[in-house]
Amino acid sequence: MVEDGTKILSNVIASQISIHTKFGGVVPEVASRAHLEAVSPVIRQAMSDAGADWKDIAAVAVSYGPGLAGSLLVGVSAAKAVAFSAGLPLVGINHMEGHIYANWLSGEIPDFPLICLTVSGGHTDLMLMTGHGKYKMLGSTRDDAVGEAFDKVARLLDLGYPGGPAIDREAQKGKPIIDLPQAVLSEPYDFSFSGVKTHIYRMCEKDLPASVPDICASFQCSVVDTLVKKTVMAARQYKAKTIILSGGVAANSALRETIVNESPVRVVMPPRGLCTDNAAMVASAGYFRFKAGNVSSMDLDVMPNLKLCC
Ligand code: KG4
Ligand code: ZN
């Protein structure tokens, strides 16, 4: 539960990581069943943690895409039930917009125009944001999302799931001693991470040329370097007042440190715990959409491939 889009009153997370770890990744059917079991207790807990009553609530926000259809259906159905029975407006939110609005929960308010780097398990997007809900896509990945590359490299190195935090931890014990390829693309703000991933795959077929911490540090350093260079270049070109980070990979310690060191403008980022999926970020995005007069109908349907902008 969030007040004024910026203050968290409660943020309950029912993590499925221990369930998915057993399978080495997310199995859609397992995920939606786990959502179904968790949704009612989580709503009750969120109300009780905030000490709130239904009459204190202005609107119910819910993520309706992108994502796994089964899990989205559980959330959207529960939100409709709550909104209908409490007589509240329903506000459908793009999950990626939720990640972006985690920045408004950081204690700092980003200034527009801003450059947003979204880095998650399914997305690597560089966007110009000129106001609330106003996005222009500057570039995105042509193949793997950056979080996906972290997860795949971690699997190659037997570091388990989710791979991002494991690589982050290992990299802190190593040095970036291996030169890895960086993609050169015709579109300056597009990304490609399959080359570096394949390079590491080939290395793992033979005797490892370095220790696991050194390989992790080299991979992370190469990826972070690309992400930061392009973000800084966009901030300069579009005269941005702020750079913001969003998505699970925004929790990466090297990315957080390097962007602050290299940025010509103020950097705002969500606290680590709000980078990965959570409800407060969706509530914050919901606040700003609701304030702008955007309310969804009770026909709101899930959109597994929902896009944020053109
Ligand atoms: O945004 P998110 O929680 O889920 C979606 O994809 O929507 O992002 C999850 C991704 C995973 O690929 C995970 O490995 C990565 O974020 N991640 C990290 C770190 N923490 C999570 N990647 C690098 N460093 C981290 N510290
Ligand atoms: Zn997410």
Image (tube, grey):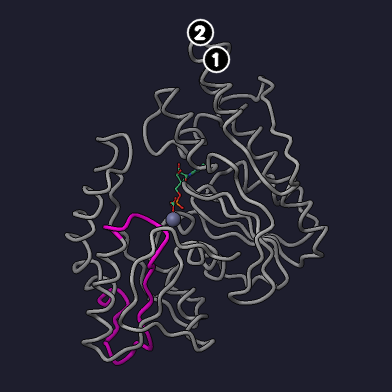
Q: Quadrant of the N terminus?
A: bottom left
Q: Does the CB distance between marks 1 and 2 fall below 8 Å?
A: yes
C-alpha separation, residue under disc 1 versus residue under disc 2: 6 Å
Amino acid bearing label 2: Lys
Q: Residue at x 54, y 16 (%)?
A: 202
x then y, percent, for residue 32: 23, 55
Query: According to the image, label 1 marks what residue?
Result: 203
Q: Quadrant of the C terminus?
A: bottom right
- 69 is within the stretch colored magenta: yes
- Rendered view: 280 above or below 225: below
Amino acid bearing label 1: Met
- Rendered view: 168 above or below 99: above
Q: Is residue 214 visible?
A: no
Q: Is residue 44 visible?
A: yes
Specify start and end residues of the magenta stretch as a single range. 47-71
Query: Can you tell me which quadrant of the image ligand 2 is in?
Result: bottom left
- Residue at disc 2, secondary structure: loop
Q: Residue at x 31, y 79 (%)?
A: 299
- Rendered view: 55 above or below 45: below
- Rendered view: 236 above or below 186: below
Q: Is residue 41 left or right of residue 95?
A: left
Query: According to the image, label 2 marks what residue?
Result: 206
Count of all numbered marks drawn on residues in the image:
2
Does the numbered disc 1 mark a residue whose Cβ is under 8 Å from ligand 1? no
x then y, percent, for residue 271: 52, 58
